[in-house]
Amino acid sequence: MSLSFTHFSFFNQVIKSCLAITLLISLSQAHAKFDCELNQGYELPADIGFNWLCSFSNELAPAQQISTEKYGAVNRQGVAAIPFEYDSPVEFIQSRALVKKADKWVLINTANHKIAEFDFQEAWNFTPVGLAQFQQDDKWGYINTSGEVVIQPQFDSIVHGFGYPLLNENVIAIFELDGKQGAINQAGKIIIPAQFDDIRRANDILFVSNNDKVGIYDYQGNMIQPVEFEFTMVNGFYSDNRWTNENWLSITKNGKVGAIDKRGNIIVPTEFDDVEIISENTFKVSKNGKYGIHGINNLITPLKFDYIANSLEGPTRVKLDGKWGYLDRSDSLMMVDYDEAYDFSEGLAMVGNNQKQQFSQKDESKSWGYINTIGEEVISLHYEDARPFEEGLAPVRLNGKWGVIDFQENQIVPFEYDAISSFEDGYAIVARAHPKIVESSTKLDKKIYEGTEYSISSDWDNDEFYINNLSDRDVSKMKFGLINRQGGIVLATDYENVTRVSEGMIGIKNNNKWGFANQQGELVFPYQFDQIFPPFKEGTIQVDNCFDDNENPISCQSDEVNSHTMHVDKQGNIINELWGSSSVTVEVEETAD
């Protein structure tokens, strides 16, 4: 989603308001202790509390006397080193604090000696760079820790001050004068006059805006880009950590998109419909429905592709003239000859081609195999379905049944399952269609299972839509089990649902109740819970039992439900519990360790 610079300014005001509210709440809870720690064995007096600014500096921490609402500072033993006589928090920066006492602002040191006194209307304490902003005659300026005025009071407000923990705030302050914003450095030099609606800092540059148009200046006040772009920034630069810490940002001009680097230099010109990073210093660009690859300041491939994927590993996946293939590292086309293709995973990519069914010229199925990063078909296309390699193993389907192969196409798990999940931490969930639980329907196909005719829904062939997801498995008509990466059966396919292994424990469900087994498949404690929330975390897991107002068991997915929520350990002991009611259905999402 893109937001204009004006939208960003609006959100900034919202954030400021939220911070102000948080400040008021924090001050009203001045007795609360946050990150300040006294020496072991010491406590604050009953009438003294750390406030929201709590942090030790020069071995002193700001505190407040609750009864008088006066501020002072305590040492690591909780003793008042600065008496509680001030009307603003006492926090020391470079052994100095600017505090209010009655109608005066006073500069003190850590011994509470007065260094200077001021008739300021308002002031803020020093920031880490040793500057404090003050207001005099309705104008704002700055003093240093010696009490000297280093920037004369001349601004209507300080929008962003010096020295807060954001990018480069030690260098530049943003001020407002006569409704416009400008920038000033610590030496007091105005590097950008007050001429913009908004100025924002990011990395090593300043974004300036007027009338919803954005330009870029450096920290010396030099213009890098004129005020002519429509911005897409949400919060600073876009950093794609999948690749490197390189930063880039998309920009728009006259409805066309380009990109700039973290210093504001244009690296992709504003002439495309869309720009998206796909690898280090490489961008996917599109125009009029066609895609190409753009590097830093140059178009690497022409805009001729139907689609270019954001491939995270190996060659980039592309579609050309209705066929899928890949671009190698030199951006040369490689193996553009497939009806379907996936991104590379563990050095291999899953590819498929359409094949006509034996008895129908209308219906098509796909044959699947795998290629390596130089385009060689290392596993021929003869499987009916397949999944990407994970942990050196891949589920594949042959003759209507799923098994598992390794990189050399050795059969690790026999072809006997109706579904197999991906492997995670050495385990995979497997499923079979059991005749006792399959509901008949006029729309169901007839199949044979262990000599018995039964009905199976046609959408069960789309097993990828449920086997990897706890909630989807919970409403399927399958029976589930668990195998290890050697193909050994940990749990036979006898369960209504199973979870992935977490901290050595496996959730298992039968007769609509959950219990838990260990990694050897042994039941640890019995089926007794209506709902579980895997995984185990630090030895415990949340479980629920659900009931109606008359304490009768009821589905946890009911519109109105009462719940008995517990946290249990690996032996089934209740660690804590809570009784409550809810009219909101909770979506359970399994997360593996």
Image: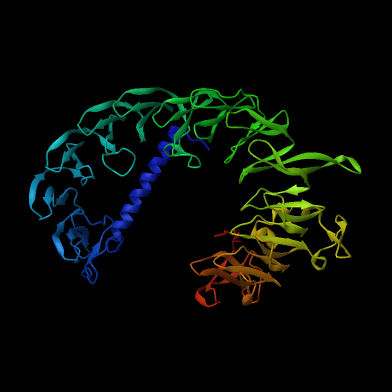
Seen in the picture, residue 91 relative to 37 is either above or below; the reply is above
**Observer-nearest residue: 373 or 257?**
373
State left or right for residue 338 relative to residue 551: right
Q: Quadrant of residue 198?
A: top left
**Observer-nearest residue: 501 or 191?**
501
State left or right for residue 179 relative to residue 6: left
Q: Quadrant of the C terminus?
A: bottom right
In percent of the image, x 42 and y 25: which residue is there?
265
Tell me which colouring the rendered structure shows: rainbow
Residue 477 shows in the view:
no
**Observer-nearest residue: 219 or 592?**
592
Location of residue 507 in the rendering, given as x and y in whole percent from the top left corner: 62, 68
Location of residue 204 in the rendering, given as x and y in whole percent from the top left corner: 35, 33
Residue 269 shows in the view:
yes
Location of residue 566 in the rendering, given as x and y in whole percent from the top left corner: 53, 72
State left or right for residue 19 relative to residue 156: right
Seen in the picture, residue 20 relative to 286 is either above or below; the reply is below
Location of residue 402 in the rendering, given as x and y in whole percent from the top left corner: 76, 55
Seen in the picture, residue 163 relative to 423 is either above or below; the reply is above
